[in-house]
Amino acid sequence: MTTSKLPKDPYSIVITGVGGQGNVMASRVLANMLVKKGYYVTIGETFGASQRGGSVMSHIRVSNLSAWSPQIPAGKAHLVVALEPIEAIRVLARYGNPDIKVLSNLRPIYPAGVIAGEASYPNEQEIRTILEKHTSKYWLIKATEEAVKLGNPILANVMMVGATCAIGDLPFDRNDFIDAMSQVLSGDKMETNIKAFELGFSLLMK
Amino acid sequence: MSHLLDPKAGATYLLMGNEAIVRGALEAGVNVASGYPGTPSSEIIENLSRIAKERNIYVEWSVNEKVALEVAAAASFAGLRSLCAMKQNGVNVASDFLLHLVYSGTRGGIVLVSCDDPGALSSVNEGESRYFARQLEMPLLEPGNFQEAKDMTKWAFELSEQLKQIVMLRSVTRMSHASGNVSYGALPETKRKAEFKFKGFILDPEEGIITSAPVEWRHKEQQDKIRKAKEIFEESPFNTYEGPDKPELLIITSSACYLYSKEAVEVLNVQDRVGILKLGTTWPLPPKLVTHYLARTEQVMIVEEVIPFMEENVKVLAAEKAGEIGAKKFFGKNEGVLPSVGEMNPDFVISAISSILGIDYSPVSKEYDQSAKLSAFVHAPARDQVFCPGCPHRASFFAIRRAIELDGRNGFVCGDIGCYTMAVRPTGFETLKTVHSMGSGMGLASGFGKLGLFGMDQPTFAVCGDSTFYHAVIPALINAVHNKSNVTLVILDNGGTAMTGFQPHPGQDFNVMGESMPAIDMARICEAIGARVEKRNPLDLEDTLHTLLEMMEDKNGVKVLILSQYCALSPQRRGKKDYELSVDETVCLGEECGCGRFCTRIFRCPGLVWNKEKAKAEIDQVICVGCGVCADICPRGAIKRKEVA
Amino acid sequence: MEEKKLTRGQQEVREKVISLGLCTGCGACINLCPYFRSHRGKTSILFPCTVENGRCFAFCPKIEVDLDNLSLSIFDQPYDGNALGRYRSIFTAKAGEKIKSFEAQAGGTVSSLVYYALTKGYISGAVLTDRRGLEPIPRYVTNAEDVFSCSQSKYTAAPTLAVVNEVVEKGEVNIGVVGTPCQILALAQMKTREKPYPISLSIGLFCTWAIDFRLFEPFISRWIQASHIRKVDIPPPPAEILQIFTSQGEKIEIPLSEIRPLVPKGCAYCMDMTSEFSDISVGVLEGRPDMNTLIVRTERGQKLVDEAIKEGYLIVSDMPKENLEHLLWAAGNKKQRALKRASDENLINCESLSYLRLKGELLNQLTQ
């Protein structure tokens, strides 16, 4: 199988969020599309915090050459896809660099310490300032709000995959998405997911 | 059909390491699989159970790891191929049987899969299972990527049959829970018939009896197997070298550390200076192969996780061969260039190589690095792990903590491993004061309960989960009752092995394959042992509290309180709200005297949110699961609970 | 430099009262919030609270008690250090003929007054202290006939004020309270901080010390099961014994010297023997086990006593001089000892939080 050249090889993506947001599902969908296209894909994940309000992170390495480390080296990520905005900020501290791109959902999930009044959460302007300063390009989208309109906040993760497609660094499109999803979903669920993907795509095109 | 059953050789899938191990076992024609749930190993048995019927495999979650290994060994003794999976501390549990098993030897191929957790990402230890291979003298294999995880598992069965010995396959979290491309081999048709043969000559490995005695004779047999393994390993395709003929620095590595080393060499662009010897057969080491590469360099760094196991083994070999190859300079954990705690990553390897080769490396400018770190420090507050919304453990520990404070004698709780371990944190009101291995809370409590002789009058509790109860609590409970230890055991019965994904346990009336099974009633077990037993619903806070207080006053030996309520994520409760919750803002006291934000500051269910602007509590309807407990903790009754029809 | 904010809440109560062992378990901080609870006679803090100006602190009779402030609030006069506190009149007393006979302590004066106050609607309910075995159980009584079941002395420290807080929270008004000096002091602080407070009558008991229930129960179990106890009594001096009457009709006598180690540490710092901030105070009368001493302190108290006498619920006569002298001596003694101890331990008039505040010269005079 011939594969097209990547902007970088390995191309390194961090998908981040909070346990329960569908982080793992988003990284699987993305990786499955790319494996089908003939790339080597390595995903590194931590599962422990997945249902318990902790930060969760998937590292995805895409390559024409081989499997790579399931952990991205410091400062070496190319794209961050964040389902929660302060998780993007957290990722930048370790994996960020001036060339990095960040795509983030705007809906906050407050850490227990913030709910308990022991810590404070940044406002949207503060988030924008930090992303402006530490990325080459960033996009903040209201994925959860749009997902709620579609009937389920969890669809924000699929929306983020659609938006990632719109960034254009990775070689996949709507058809690849349908192809990958049709193995796990059927019927009306499939339809809603395609809608979420398209909506995510269009949010970035605006 | 599961993607793991695709019969097409050459088909490529993205598999999680644990799935790759499953595919390898399928390609080897595994007949029996057993285990006890534990992150990062659980997906192996889970995935096998889903396809068990299609492939005619017997799969079980056993009561604990020792029994699991015995179940797998029985299959081997009967000539079948079997796999046994567990996390690192499980090997300790199984090790007593294992010690004897390696003497007696095995028949059908048997593979012990141990999934270690360096860095304790989902554990309360970062224990090493590799040392068991050396200590118990059995072969050890460690896959270095996802393809190898599949291929090596398949080969491990063949090796086991060749040696008539159990083979240990060791994975780590970053292998088991990472995913990568795996190209399939063919699935065989297996037609093995089980028969235990014992009527042959007593020492006949195929038809005699299977025991660890006569010890010296068996032990010698065992060591002969290790010698044979060395010869086989010399030729193994799982040991590879990449790099220059005469590297300035030779890295010897294995497992996920191979990927970190490869990454580090790539990042530093030192492919022409550094060679990587990746070993898949890490015990016993293949001496000729390792000596061959040691001879070509002056500097050696061993890259592995946690304790310097391979480092020690390579150094022994290098010392033996020093006359042939000369003295080498070693880098690693003993010398200090790499840490011997926590998990490894590419950055540690990058920094180690940089320091050895004198390379000045930083991935980003100092300004960027400092600024990004400062932003995260200030604006991305840490996410403490918390009990889920509606978790019955929150309610249970709320009652236990209050009972202890009301009693006022400085009582404490000994815990063990499960979601409830988080009760050392504010989410469980910092109630747990000891956490060790499965069941050890009860054992410790049994001991504490006897210290009255030395003036101790602190009330002692133990807590355990339902699955843990069957795994390792029963002997400790027997000990406490028999020795008249004055303690209270609280069993947090949430209807399954919740932390690892609701694997069934012997208290339930079904097994992993969904078949109907007799449930072993824990209350009757406790009563039969001689404890006083009470059952409560932890979501009824006051009832639970009063029962606990009353039990603390009861000085007649061991009390057991079973707090039964399904996990909020369980199939029984998930997505079903019993109540609609709302906050009456006109009644909510907020920060005032009489409340002081009790629900959001102390009770801390994630479904409760503090609205700073209004200075009132709110319910996050997306997160709330409608258990209704918060309505009972609000001092003003401002949280309203409406039953969902 | 930023000045450290002076907070008056749970943390201070924990550090300056509970940790120092001054808490007598009076119940003033109980049922106000989810943080303080009483269990088996002991006050516990369940979780940390961060409210900076809490009622727990304001009500507690063992922290920042400003005697002048209190006296001005209750009597419109500053604190003068009198051994019996401020009062209008003092008598000997016992239940009148309208009261049927019941098993009471000494003259039954307290029960008679509460019964009368309830019957005549002077109060709509009374917070009293009942007993389960040896454990004192505070109760809110609205039916006058129930008064008599709470009539006996308990001698064990009780969280009576927890029930006051509970019924105030429920919106009850015209509440009567019978309590020990520490409880009456706390009650006075409640009335001072939150005006108007729905307490219409406070009857104070004489008290030299109470017994820690948690120590008392195992101690007594050497002689008798708690459930077989009918009545506990400490007859007036010079008896120096504690008597236990069993339901089988036996009497057990225990020397007070054996009981004193069971007294909470906090009682040793109490300078009030006669409930100086009550409307009416009642206690034993030396040498007369069938009579009480009655001190009337407020106008409201005076009115109740006058009417009770008039309607035949109470019989009073003049206090014999030697009895008054002895009472003054005993109360003065307790005050001096407590003030001296607290003063020596630097708990009075400190720069930071104190147990007590009173005029410096008065303190000197009282501790000499």
Image (cartoon, coloured by chain):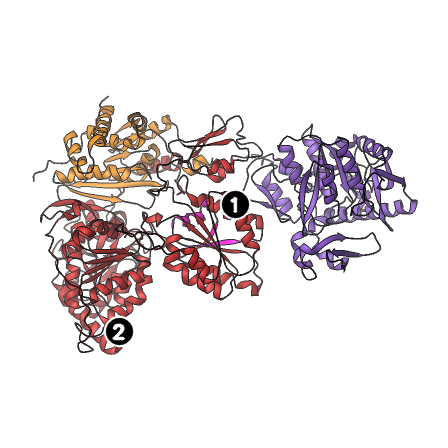
Q: Characterize the local packing of mark 2: few (<14), some (14-19) or many (20 or more) Cα atoms within 10 angstroms.
A: some
Q: Is residue B157 left or right of residue C241?
A: left
**Where does the image place residue A22, in percent across and percent down from the top left?**
29, 37
Single out the mark in the foreground, 1 or 2: 1
Q: Characterize the local packing of mark 1: few (<14), some (14-19) or many (20 or more) Cα atoms within 10 angstroms.
A: few
Q: Which residue is mark 1?
A: B543
**Where does the image place residue C187, in percent across and percent down from the top left?**
70, 36
Q: Which residue is mark 2?
A: B212
Look at chain B in the picture and name its colour.
Answer: red
Q: Quadrant of residue A185?
A: top left
- One can see residue B302 in this view: yes
**Where does the image place residue B642, in percent across and percent down from the top left?**
45, 31
Q: Amino acid at mark 2?
A: Ser
Along the viewing direction, whichever of C207 and B238 lies nearer the viewer:
C207
Look at chain A in the picture and name its colour.
Answer: orange
At 84% from the left edge and 32% from the top edge, which residue is drawn? C307
| Label 2 residue SS | loop
User: Is residue B410 inside the magenta stretch?
Assistant: yes
Specify start and end residues of the magenta stretch as a single range.
B409-432
Q: Is residue B51 left or right of residue B556?
A: left
Query: Chain for mark 1?
Result: B
Separation (CA) of disc 1 from disc 2 = 54 Å
Residues indicated by labels 1 and 2 sit on the same polypeptide chain = yes
Q: Earlier in the sequence, mark 1 or mark 2?
A: 2
Split into 4 quadrants, where in the image is the C terminus of chain B? top left
Look at chain C in the picture and name its colour.
Answer: purple
